[in-house]
Amino acid sequence: MARAYVLIRAEAGKVGTAVDAIRKLPNVKAADAVTGPYDVIAVLEAEDFDTLGKSVVDGIQKIEGVYRTLTCLGVDL
């Protein structure tokens, strides 16, 4: 199982609707508005990293109001 933490920046006034839309996407396990330099953090899980990447590019990045993402992949150490 592959896991990613996606840090998301959204336009002012669109954070709430972005969170709602992100939560409805496949492979999204959680999404919350947060304080700090990013507006939303989402946790995604999928069978492989390719699927996670497609979820970000074809899903999160296409949501109205989202203008930047930073994807951090979970690793086993």
Image (tube, grey):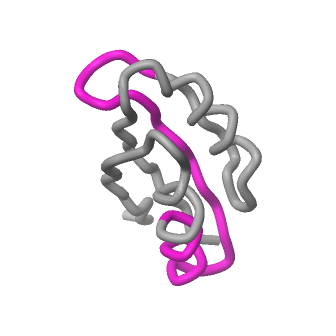
**What residue is at 60 percent from the left and 55 percent from the top?**
44
**Residue 65 image offset from top left, x and y in percent:** 45, 39
Residue 29 higher or lower than 75, as above or below: above
Q: Nearer the viewer, residue 3 or 42?
A: 42
**Residue 54 image offset from top left, x and y in percent:** 54, 76
Magenta stretch encompasses residue 77? no
- Whether residue 27 sits left or right of residue 16 in the image: it is right
**Residue 47 image offset from top left, x and y in percent:** 68, 77
**What residue is at 39 percent from the left and 35 percent from the top?**
10
**What residue is at 50 percent from the left and 23 percent from the top?**
33
Residue 55 higher or lower than 15, as above or below: below
Magenta stretch encompasses residue 55? yes
- Whether residue 61 sits left or right of residue 16 in the image: it is left
Quadrant of the snapshot with the C terminus: bottom left
- Whether residue 63 sits left or right of residue 61 in the image: it is right
Task: Write the start and end of the magenta stretch as one range.
Answer: 34-56
Quadrant of the snapshot with the N terminus: bottom right
Residue 48 higher or lower than 27, as above or below: below
